[in-house]
Amino acid sequence: MPPRQISARAARAARAALQLTQAEMARFLGVSFASVNRWEQDRGTGPRGLAAQVYRAILRARHRITLMRLREIPHEA
């Protein structure tokens, strides 16, 4: 059974977890800006191959990524 397609919502959530723009995400994945934009707008097919694997890894780790960011925020004494 092939892995499930990455939804547009999941693609946006993965990028948001890394706090990247669409252009930055495209460079990170080695794809065009237009591809990332299409994936996030639910036009055409979603990410495939290595890009889909990277999105899945980010989605699995996004809670840890968020916790790491929270630890970086200075707290008032």
Image (spheres, grey):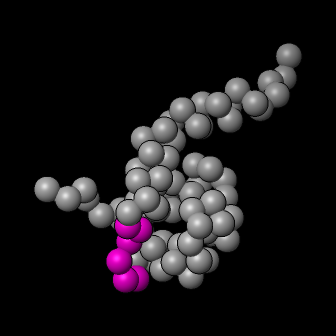
Chief secondary structure of the magenta portion: loop
- Asked if residue 39 lies left or right of residue 5, the reply is right
Q: Position of residue 15 (x, y in %)?
A: 57, 57
Specify the segment rendered in magenta: 43-48
Residue placed furthest toward the left: 1
Residue situated in front as seen by the camera: 23 or 69: 23
Relative to 53, residue 65 above or below? above
Relative to 14, residue 66 above or below? above
Q: Is residue 47 magenta?
A: yes
For the point 64% across and 31% down, the residue is 68
Q: Position of residue 27 (x, y in %)?
A: 65, 66
For the point 48% across and 38% down, the residue is 61
- Asked if residue 77 lies left or right of residue 41, the reply is right
Residue situated in front as seen by the camera: 74 or 51: 51
- Asked if residue 16 lies left or right of residue 44, the reply is right
Q: Is residue 53 magenta?
A: no
Position of the C terminus, as image quadrant, is: top right
Relative to 26, residue 42 above or below? below
Relative to 34, residue 62 above or below? above
Q: Position of residue 49 (x, y in %)?
A: 38, 63
Q: Is any part of residue 43 visible from this angle?
A: yes
For the point 51% across and 62% down, the residue is 12
